[in-house]
Amino acid sequence: MQEYMHVLLQEQTMKHRLNASVAFLPSLAGIFLAASAPMAAQAQAINLNPGVTPGLSLYFPNARDYAFCEIVPVGTTAEFYQTTGTTGPRGGCPAAPYAAINPSDLATALGVSAVQMNPSPQTARRHWVMDEISIYELGETIDFMGVDATWMGTMSLQQLQAGITGPYQISEIQRATKWHFNKGSNVYKLLSPDGKFYVMQSYTNEIDNNLSLAQLTQLGSKLNLPSGWSFETMVLTQDLTVDTTKANGTAHIVRDNLSNVYQGCGFDNACSFADVPGPVPLLGMASAFGMSRKIRRRIRSGMTSSLAARQGGSGE
């Protein structure tokens, strides 16, 4: 993956502090249960120094369907370490080492109350859905028992508890990120009764083991949508960006009942959607394309007939 990842050293310190997970944990209740559990056997100590390393940022092209995972040590705060952009044998969330991590043992090694693994079960993966990622602030990269992950944000325990809300409940996260969706790409949207819409940023197979990117166009049939909510697959007519730095670092997040995660548009200036023509529905686009072909045939037929009449021929 190294050819897909460029860590950019920036000359100026970023103005926005990344105060939340890039991915938003889909299931966090286990953290508070684990925090009261007895500590596991002795493990080799791992020292953490979470926080922003000035000048570091991440630009990650070709992000669509990239698999990643998060490791979240929970003490007085929750610190989010993520595998996106990591390389080498411990990079990119390697399957066997990630599955082998015992969260209790890792918590002991880190000297924290608990560790949350995202996704869980650890045989699952989370996958990005945007085409390009920009993360404006990063920290240290740590070897978590064979899995390299980079610090990308922090949450207070109050923020963490807010993230435990069930599916289709809106929460806010502070972070400095930009998602880029290319013209012509599929986007997958939840529409809420108040007229807001939420663009999928990641999907996971932790609940639906067979869920894949190719199946997302049919995801609506698998969702248990509340009254007034709907799901749509759209094809963008031009680029879409979702940039929290244009909204004071605020991301409005919602997850569906399969733990796929979406970011909201229409709350503020984060989404370029409000400034450009909206996307065309996938099925509607096919219909429009078919109609345009009919129109073009009629135009060509009319032009041919007219030319033939002027030339005294039949046009065939």
Image (cartoon, rainbow, N blue to C red):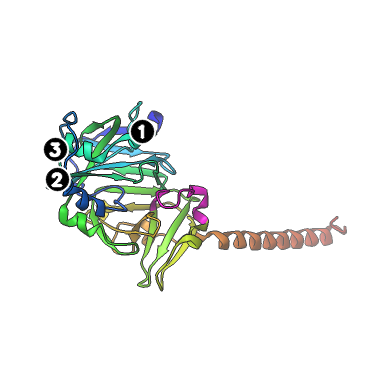
* Up/down of 144 relative to 78, above or below: above
For label 2, the residue is 75
Pointer 2: residues within 10 angstroms few (<14), some, or many (20+)? some
* Residue 244: % across, % down: 27, 53
Q: Earlier in the sequence, mark 3 or mark 1?
A: 1
**Label 2 close to label 3 by CB (< 8 Å):** yes
The magenta segment is 201-217
Residue type (three-letter) at the residue carrying disc 2 = Gly
Q: Identify the secondary structure beneath mark 2.
A: loop
Q: Residue at x 38, y 60 (%)?
A: 256
Distance from Cα at disc 2 to Cα at disc 3: 8 Å
Identify the image quadrant of the N terminus. Answer: top left
Of tags 3 and 1, the one toward the viewer is 3
For label 1, the residue is 5
Q: Earlier in the sequence, mark 2 or mark 3?
A: 2
Pointer 3: residues within 10 angstroms few (<14), some, or many (20+)? some
Seen in the image, is 171 located left or right of residue 292? left
* Up/down of 37 relative to 268, above or below: above
Q: Which residue extends farthest right?
A: 313
Q: Identify the secondary structure beneath mark 1.
A: loop
Quadrant assignment, res 96: top left
* Residue 101: % across, % down: 29, 36
